Amino acid sequence: MKKQDIIIITSTIAIGLLVIVVTLSKYNLGKVSKTSFQARLNTYSLNVYSSDLNELFKISPFDDFYYKGYTKNHLVERNSYKREVRFSEKLQSLLPGFLKPNNIITWSVSNKKDIYLTYQVTSDQNQILITRTFEKLEPSVYAVGQSFIICKDCYIVDQYKKVYLSQSQVNDDKIKKANSAQFTPVIISQNLIPSNISKLIIFDSNFNPKYSISINSSQQVFYDEKWNLLELKTFINQERPTKVSQVITIIK
Amino acid sequence: MDRTIADLILSSLFFIIPISVGRFFTKQIGISWIFGSLIWFIYLLVISSLLDLINTKTPYLPIFTITTLSLFFSSIALMIYKNRKSLIKTRSLNISKFFFLKTFPYSILVALSLVLYFYIWRDQTPFPLQLNWDIYEHITASNNILQYKLSFFPSQISDSFTFDGYTSFFQLLLTLPLSLISSNLIGVYFFLEYWHFLLTILVSYLLAKTVFKSTAFGILGGIISAFIFESSVVYSTFFLIPQSMAGVWTIIILIGLINKNIHVYNLELPFSKLIRSLKLNQLLIALLSSLFLIHFIIGFLGILIILTFIILEKKNINNTNLNKLIFLLLIALMTTAVLHIFGTWTITDREEAIYFNLSLYKKISLLFDWYSLFLPFFYSMGVLISVKSSNRLLKILTILSLISLVISIAPFSYFLKFFVIGRYLINLIILSSFVFLLSKVSKVLKYFSIIWIAFVFFVVFYTNQSNYKDQLYFLGYRSHISKSEIELSNWLNQNYSKETLIISDPATQYVLEAISGINSQGGAYMDIQTRQTLSSINNLNDKNLLKERLLTIEDRLPHIKKNHRKTLFIVGGRYFKWQDLPNDQKLSFYYNVWRPYPISYANNSYLNFLTNNFKTLYQNDQLLVLEIK
């Protein structure tokens, strides 16, 4: 083979490989599709849909909180949001489609200052595990609030068949509906749901069950019906990084 | 399956019917297609005008069909008559090596097109679902041509057109397949876009082969074209719309000029003298007129490109001066880029124009999505090679590619659309880099490199088209429309006629009107008044007020409005999604609900109100049809 041949072929292969690497890094990851649900990573949120593409819930760093002293703060504000793409994610994006893991979404974000957080969604059949890993939370942060924006006009019911309604949003129609569905309406003030529950089930506006969220005994649960925001306040220890997880089960 | 085959055959008539007439004037198939299309447009426009003049009460459609069929079968008969002697002779099947070599490139490219179109592009978009948002207004206009009449401008045919960027030439051509057998254009379009895709590959192959005089590089040229998918604004390959057709026609004419194929076919017919008098320049003028009529703006660039080619080719401009012109255009390219610092300018006063006013970053980003590193690296190399080369034709085509690129990235709204022509020339210059590099290596390495380059382009293509379709996922399919919407459209078509007006959100009525043939006010381009009316009934619980407001909605074209007797209100997931948009977006043409949505839990109570107060005519899992009277 002539020297010229070698140079031209090597250059062609090298440039081709570079194009492939650059192109595949833009391949749209951030999807998990199962028969009972679909999870998709959008620009500012991670959304989970039912099989008929009704939105079940979404999570976002703009809706999560951290607790420090007497203050409760949003993890990330919109104007300081930054998506962090980890090297492992870049490597993963280079794999051909059939080799990519199809049950994981990883989403790393920061507020460009002191909050670095990774959401990881893994799934198995109809169960979703959402793990939030905080890289370097300040020692003074004692709790984090994991928030779910649930479906509009959906109801929250615990394992004792109690339906929780915000005092500010309650009306006769809702109470009547809850009663006719054989549930006990409970009106909550200050958005705080009583602490002796291990599971919350989300029902749609016709009281069809959609999914359930497991609750740890140490967690406090808040529900702001006006914003459809369900928050699980988890008290954390000093170990860093900090991981908090939640299991969601899709009800078929 | 039957309908699939029928629509496949009908789609081929889009080409065959015009070619059947154009062939009498010129031998070259592509040129005869363009010229034949023009003849059909003029012919049917005259028929329509005459009918208008007579003011006859005779329905338009039968006359349209009869005259179309008459002309078509006459031209077939004349062609058979002309070739009667050769048809009578029996021929043995000549599978010679020469025949094989001649058809081999086409076989490769056809096979490639079939795999790319049906197996990859249409992977989750089976017949008759669609990926092209722009087809519905054209289908609506074509349906209206058949129901009412042909007019010169589309805005006179359907109120879905608020701006006449072209004549109704394209919409008229779409009706030609339906002149033989009635069918739904949505299915015909599925195959039409395949033929268009194949055509873009074949013209790229022919252009490359003509310039480089090599079948291998011609095939690579076709492959490159197949793998470049402009996923925004341009849409030259997978989408058959007036602008993409203008792009293909420009290149067909250019190839004809390069090969000196634009001449009259000698016929032994009664009007031979008249036909022979149609010299090159007159035929060329007719072809350029076709370009302009199919799309005013893109056609204008096409004409500019063609005329520039003619001037550069015919005038005694030496290679040195051509090189100077290349340098000037490179400076113009840089100037155009720098101009973005001062801002971008909106050309028309159309509301959506501002959204097509793209920043330089966005344009470069899009070019990068479509070409990856090939454009900056190999196009630059190609321009340099052209300057150093003594190939005059290559220099001229480089100049034309630079003209297109300069105009495409100029800081004005919509200008990126000009890339629909530029892409063929730019691809050719990229190819010239490969030709230069690979012509220096051995034959084995050359073919290996071609395969490798094709593979890399494939990766770019696959990623690009996958990212485009990703946003359209719904219930296992990727499409702008759902099977439930098609089912509803079929039901509407079977049970209602032109006396009915359907009302829904812009996107829903846009697709339903096209597929069912039942009228709406403006489709996706419903006017501000209708948008305000629809917005005002969001969650409205007053039955009488709701009814009163809906009944104020009317078509804007008098000859269509006068037929209106019934009103149907259609709600579904898209409708509720649209109602949830901020008000300024609801009043905008630019914002649409681009894919189907299910009816969400939150809408159940309002649906109950509607079904309790209005008669439900039809319901499926996604849509509800209510009678308003």
Image (tube, coloured by chain):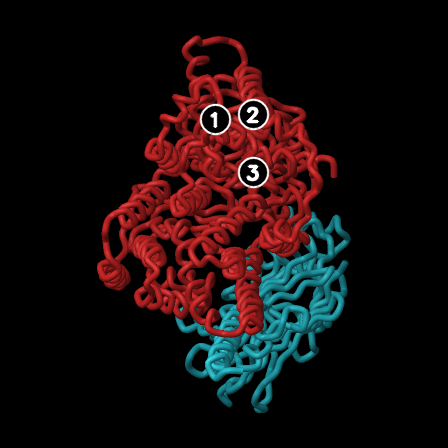
Chain colours: A cyan, B red
| Dot 2 crowding, Cα within 10 Å, few <14, some 14–19, many 20+ | some
> How many residues crowd mark 1 within 10 Å: few (<14), some (14–19), many (20+)?
some
Above or below, comparing residue A244 to residue B371 in the picture = below
The residue tagged 3 is: B511
Q: Does residue B428 appear in the picture of this structure?
A: yes
Q: Are marks 1 and 2 in contact (CB under 8 Å)?
A: yes
x then y, percent, for residue B385: 35, 67
> On what subunit does the disc labeled 2 rest?
B
Please report whichever mark, 1 or 2, sits nearer to the chain's N-terminal start: 2
In this rendering, position of residue B513 left or right of residue B45: right
Whichever of labels 1 and 3 marks the residue nearer the N terminus, that label is 1
Q: Position of residue B16 (x, y in %)?
A: 56, 33
In the picture, measured across the screen, residue B600 lies left or right of residue B38, that is right
Instruction: State which chain disc 1 sits on.
Output: B
Q: Is residue B180 above or below residue B356?
A: above
Q: Residue at x 61, y 83 (%)?
A: A243
Per the image, the residue denoted by label 2 is B82
The residue tagged with tag 1: helix, strand or loop? loop
> How dense is the environment of label 3, judged by Cα within 10 Å: few (below 14), some, or many (20 and up)?
many
Residue B267 numbered tag: 1
Dot 3 or dot 2, earlier in sequence: 2
